Image (cartoon, rainbow, N blue to C red):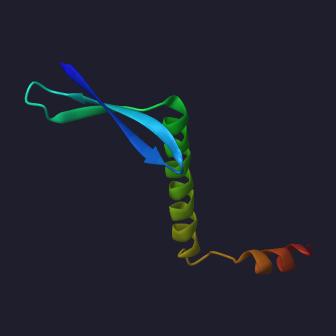
Amino acid sequence: MSMETKTVKKSGSKTEVRYIVNHKGEKTEVVLPIELYEALLERIEDAEDVQAIEEAMKEPDFIPWEEAKKQLGV
């Protein structure tokens, strides 16, 4: 297994991303700085939350927030 390093620019700063390549030179894996990895995980979780909210809003028993507050007397 060999390793190729490529530096990419993101948001005005340099982020080092390393690719692991197979014997044919094909990229098979990527190595990211932990900060970038954690930021990507957070974005994925946020997108999943948005999707869950959108699905919940389609349910027949969904009550909009303003209506729920009225029902609760808040």
Q: Is residue 22 left or right of residue 16?
A: left
Q: Residue 70 in the image: x percent, y percent?
A: 85, 80
Q: Residue furthest top?
A: 1
Residue 5: x and y in percent read 31, 29
Quarter of the image with the N terminus in it = top left
Is 70 in front, or is 38?
Answer: 38
Task: Report the label total.
Answer: 0
Which residue occupies 78% across, 81% down? 67
Quadrant housing residue 72: bottom right
Among all residues in the image, which is located at the extreme left? 24
Residue 18 located left or right of residue 60: left
Q: Residue at x 14, y 27 (%)?
A: 22
Determine whether, in the image, residue 25 is placed left or right of residue 49.
left
Figure quadrant of residue 8: top left
Residue 57 shown left or right of residue 5 in the figure: right
68 vs 28: above or below:
below
Residue placed furthest toward the right: 73
Residue in view at x 55 percent, y 43 percent: 39
Quadrant of the image containing the C terminus: bottom right
x and y percentages locating residue 29 in the rendered image: 27, 32
| Above or below 6: residue 48 | below
Write down the quadrant of residue 54 in the picture: bottom right
Closer to the camera, 47 or 70?
47
Q: Position of residue 40 (x, y in %)?
A: 49, 44
Q: Residue at x 61, y 75 (%)?
A: 61
| Residue 12 or residue 40, whichever sits in front | 12
Q: In this picture, is 7 found above or below 2?
A: below
